Amino acid sequence: MGEGVLTTGFQRRNGELRCDDVSLRSIAAAVGTPSYVYSAAAVRDAYGRLETALAGLPAHIHYAMKANSNLAVLRVLRACGAGVDVVSSGELHRALLAGFSGSQIVFAGVGKTRAELEHALHVGVQCVNVESEAELELLSHVAIARGAIVPVSLRINPGVANVTAGHAYIATGEAGSKFGIPLARGLKAAARADALPGIELVGLDMHIGSQIADVEAFADAQRRLRGLLDGVRAAGITTIRSVDVGGGFPVAYHDAEPTADLDGFARVLRDTFGDADVALIVEPGRFLVAEAGVLLTEVLYRKESAPKHFMVVDAGMNDLLRPSHYAAYHEIEPVFESAAPLQVVDVVGPVCESGDFLALNRSMPDVGAGTLLAVRNAGAYGYVMSSTYNSRPRPAEVLVEGDRWAIVALRESQDDMVRLERIAPDWRSA
Ligand SMILES: Cc1ncc(COP(=O)(O)O)c(C=O)c1O
């Protein structure tokens, strides 16, 4: 399926799970837990596999930085040659800090504010991916006010079935989804974009969801978008020069799950847009970073409450939300191989919510307090979704580069958490 055996990232040596040439135990000892650890080599490896599959196509990879927006991770991907897909002014700011230029940035997002559109124009992004007719009108006003012409891509909702191999929350291309402009209105929206001052219609885009293992699902959506492209051109609008087909390549969270069929995806792209005379953009997030990260956590307590056995760990839903929010599965392993017998446990965090868990009914070595665990494939939608709920500081992030490692986000302190609050408010008269 276009995947080789991973030679970078997380491997066991003498029973210890390591990140490339660095001991996870030594990182945990120095930085504490919970902490995210990322392998730069594994990020580069994933990027290289996708780049190889796309070779020969006029395609460029724009990393969907919502998956992991740590500045040091962004720099790894920038050095690979990636552009970025941002969905907020905050992400735009981060992308610029990481060294991306405006022309390497596409700005997506269903609810961009006027200020965000102004920011996009100020930076000179490659294009604004517009998600509604109303946004198109506002963007035109913003562009006229600045005396600018803004390159625009229309995000189309192709109205496909839920094609994701996961939770309904990761599907974005179905009829009735909040994302994009319904395919049936695409031609009209394109005509409006073509007519509006301050707007240059340069592209069409879509993103149908995440964890898409079936290349036929990509093919179906892409054929719909190609149909619209042809329709727009037949209507005399000839300015479209790029098509962005989104992200959504899957990651095997379970051994049994399929990996991304990158060659199959490239074939579909070639079959559908090979003769379309457009530059192609793909926007993967998860695929590039998920396998490159773990969350390190320590077992605090073992506890029984019949019929359940609990492993209470020091990472909670505020650190890794995916199990609770998406019922997502993450492999959890002791960093040191354990000979303890297997036990079915719930791995739960310290947060005061029954929904605070990392795994339910999981068969795991029956390890005790003090054991260091690694929550696998946590590099995507991990830290970026963390919060300070229960006034728990957000974890540290560490990047490993071969046999070196560095803290790339300090653990939040208790003072950090209250820094923006005012105990003696500065009252203003009404
Ligand atoms: C517009 C857009 N592009 C790309 C992505 C990345 O998706 P994935 O991480 O599944 O590749 C997302 C994810 O939500 C998205 O909304």
Image: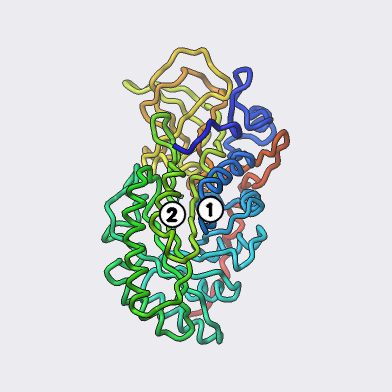
Residue 29's spot in the image, x, y percent? 67, 30
| On screen, residue 212 above or below 96 | above
State whether residue 113 appears in this view.
no
Answer left or right for 121 relative to 131.
Answer: right
Q: Which residue is mark 1?
A: 56
Residue 363's spot in the image, x, y percent? 40, 22
Which numbered marker is on residue 209? none
The N terminus, quarter of image: top left
Answer left or right for 28 relative to 65.
Answer: right
Residue drawn at (29%, 72%), measured in percent from left and top?
185
| On screen, residue 12 above or below 108 | above
Q: State which quadrant residue 190 falls in.
A: bottom left
Q: Secondary structure at mark 2?
A: helix
Q: Which residue is mark 2?
A: 270
Front residue of 265/117: it is 265
Front residue of 393/326: it is 326
Residue drawn at (36%, 57%), measured in percent from left and top?
222
State whether residue 356 appears in this view.
yes
Ligand 1, by image quadrant, is bottom left
Q: State which quadrant residue 45 falls in.
A: top right
Residue 213's spot in the image, x, y percent? 38, 42
Q: Tell whether circle 2 marks a residue whose Cβ is less than 8 angstroms from ligand 1.
A: no
| On screen, residue 252 above or below 412 | above
Q: State which quadrant residue 173 falls in.
A: bottom left
Front residue of 32/54: it is 54
Answer left or right for 99 relative to 55.
Answer: right
Counting other residues with Cα less than 10 Å from the Cα at mark 1, is it few (<14), some (14-19), or many (20 or more)? few
The answer to the question of whether label 2 and label 1 lie on touching residues, with beta carbons closer than 8 A, is yes
Q: Amino acid at mark 1?
A: Gly
